Image: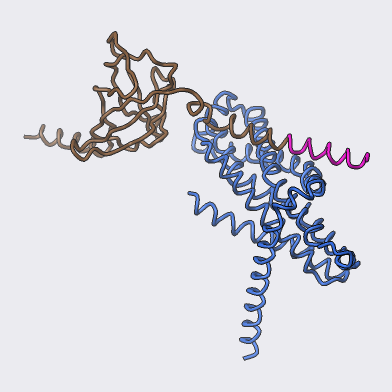
Chain colours: A brown, B blue
Amino acid sequence: MQQTRTVELGTGMFVFLGVAAIFFLATQTSNLNSLVSSEAYTVKARFENIGGLSVRAPVTMAGVTIGRVSDIAFDPNRLDAVVSIRIDARYDRIPDDSDAAILTAGLLGGQYIGLSPGGSDTFLADEDEIEFTQSAVVLENLISKYLFSQGGGDD
Amino acid sequence: MGLLRDLLFTFRAFFETFGALSLFLLRLAVYTPRALVRRFPLIVAQVHNTGALSLVIIMICGFFVGMVLGLQGYDTLSRFDSEDILGAATALALLKELGPVITALLFAGRAGTALASEIGLMKATDQLSAMEMMAVDPLRRVVVPRFVGGVVAMPFLAAIFSTIGIAGAFLVGVGLMDVDSGTFWAQMRNNVDPEDVWEGVFKSFVFGIAASVLAVFEGYNCVPTAEGVGRATTRTVVLTAIAVLVLDYIITAALL
């Protein structure tokens, strides 16, 4: 009887530790808690060029992550990219004339969407579209622009 | 000519063993649901045997693997001026690779050998035959609970290994190498996806099946002599190491 008790106690503690470890890994080391659990609303933004933006890229305002890119699609009629952004429902007072820009974190970092606030009194709601957008900066385009402007100066 | 025949014989033996192992695994899988209900206390005892008793070695090894990752990671990353991502780098390495793989290798050494030699010795001392005489199926009574216990214990062991490892990396990275502790956790949270955690859990589950089935298979099919039990124990460790590393590559390639 005592033997069985010890075995059960050891097993119980082991399983408890194991479950606690999985729980810790799932909630504390990953970004699970940022959006999945809480309420969110989705807005759309159209970009001429999204560069290297990917799904799950962060969406920030004033440097704080307030949402994530949930979907990227190509619109075959207007020939541009439609990016769906899920924004945490806590941040429901974002002016609807705010503008979205695709920016790069650090020199080699991933790309993210930065929102800059507008001055409107009405706020973004679910299924709204952000009108003012600024595409990703593609390095090759920058270089070619620079080269062509040099060429123009020589004439 | 003799060489060719030897080679063919080896190939044939390999496929025979592989086939026997697959059929054995299938039988265990079929017996498992019933064993979960009818022989639950036996399974609990085996989770204790393979899991709880492996805890100490898993925790010590996890801690030191985490600490050395923190040290080496810091050294490598600081050459690229990016020691800020130490948290993300160590967490991803532990969760996706080192946690499941090293745990499976330690599991083979600590629990797999115990299972193989225990079952092998039961066979050598005719205990399994005695059970058959009493109309008790040794496969259901002895082998299945050990197999299920190992499969249940492995994901928990791997998760504990990864958690302790991250703590070790944190201790070295933040404590000794003064990476900022906020940066350490923030980078980890920004770059580790829930899928990475589940990938590790899935891997350790598969490795648990592989390591457990190999151990009980080798024990159950050993030559019932002292030498045979010894060889079965050795083969368990060797085969588990090969199986785990091959499976690791296949799963990683499939999930990426």
Q: Is residue A93 left or right of residue A27?
A: left
Q: Nearer the viewer, residue A59 or B61?
A: A59
Q: Nearer the viewer, residue B92 or B168?
A: B92
Determine if residue B204 is in view.
yes
- Total residue callouts: 0
Q: Nearer the viewer, residue B69 or B247?
A: B247
Q: Position of residue A116 (x, y in %)?
A: 32, 18
For the N terminus of chain A, the image quarter is: top right
Query: Magenta stretch: residue A11 in it?
Result: yes
Q: Nearer the viewer, residue B25 or A90?
A: B25
Query: Magenta stretch: residue B159 in it?
Result: no
Q: Which residue, as the protein is rendered here, is positioned at the far left?
A: A155
Quarter of the figure with residue A99: top left
Q: Which residue, as the protein is rendered here, is positioned at the far right?
A: A2
At a point 36% along the width and 35% down the height, the residue shown is A71
Q: Position of residue B28 (x, y in %)?
A: 70, 59
Q: Is residue B51 above or below residue A84?
A: below
At a point 67% along the width and 35% down the height, the residue shown is A21
Q: Is residue B219 above or below residue B95?
A: below
Quarter of the figure with residue A75: top left
The range drawn in magenta is A1-16
Q: Position of residue B69 (x, y in %)?
A: 63, 40
At a point 91% along the width and 67% down the height, the residue shown is B125
Q: Which residue, as the protein is rendered here, is positioned at the far top?
A: A121
Q: Is residue B47 above or below residue B186?
A: below
The kind of secondary structure the magenta stretch mainly shows is: helix
Q: Position of residue B43 (x, y in %)?
A: 78, 48
Determine if residue B109 is in view.
no
For the C terminus of chain A, the image quarter is: top left
At a point 93% along the width and 39% down the height, the residue shown is A2
